[in-house]
Amino acid sequence: MRTTLVILAKFLITLVASWVSFIIIDVNSFEMVLMVAIAGTVINYALGDLVILPSMGNVIAAVGDGILAAATAYLFDMFSYNFITSATGLIIFAAIIGTCEYFFHIYLIKDDKVQPNEFHREPPLE
C-alpha cells in the first residue's frame, strides 16, 4: 500500500511539473499533459527509482530523472500533432523534476516500507 502512495505522489509531482511547463509555458491541452505525466511517472519510477538510484546514488538518479522526463516529453512532441514543446518548457520541466526527485529519493531511501526495498538489503555473505 505504501508503494502505491509513493507512486501516486510521484505522479502528482510530475503532473504539476508538466502543467507548469506545458500548459502555462507551451499552451498544450490538459489531456496531452496528463499522458506525458503518466508516461514520465512510469519511466522515471522503473528506471530512475528501481535501477539507477540503488546503483548510482541520489544525485545521478535525480539528474537522470529530469533528463528522462524531458526526453519523454520531447518524444511526445515528435510523435504527436497535439503536443508542442519548446526548449524553455523542456528545461523548466527537467529542472522541476530533477529538483523534486532529489528530495523524493531522500524519502525513498529512508522509508523501509516502500517496496521493493532495495535500499536496505544486507550485503551478500561471502
Image (spheres, grey):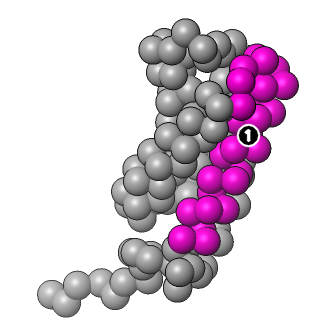
Magenta stretch in the rendered image = 4-30
Residue 98: where, in percent of width, then height? 65, 44
Q: Which residue is mark 1?
A: 17
What residue sits 71% from the left and 51% below the top? 13
Residue 22: where, in percent of width, then height? 73, 25
The residue lying furthest to the right in this view is 24
96 up-or-down from 2: above or below: above
- The picture quadrant where one finds residue 54 is bottom left
Residue 14: where, in percent of width, then height? 66, 46
Mark 1 crowd level (few <14, some 14–19, many ≥20, 10 Å Cα): many
Q: Quadrant of the C terminus?
A: bottom left
Closer to the camera, 105 or 35? 35
109 up-or-down from 49: above or below: below
Residue 29: where, in percent of width, then height? 71, 24
What residue sits 73% from the left and 40% below the top? 17
Q: Give, as a three-letter code, the residue at label 1.
A: Ala
What residue sits 50% from the left and 40% below the top? 39
What residue sits 52% from the left and 74% below the top? 3
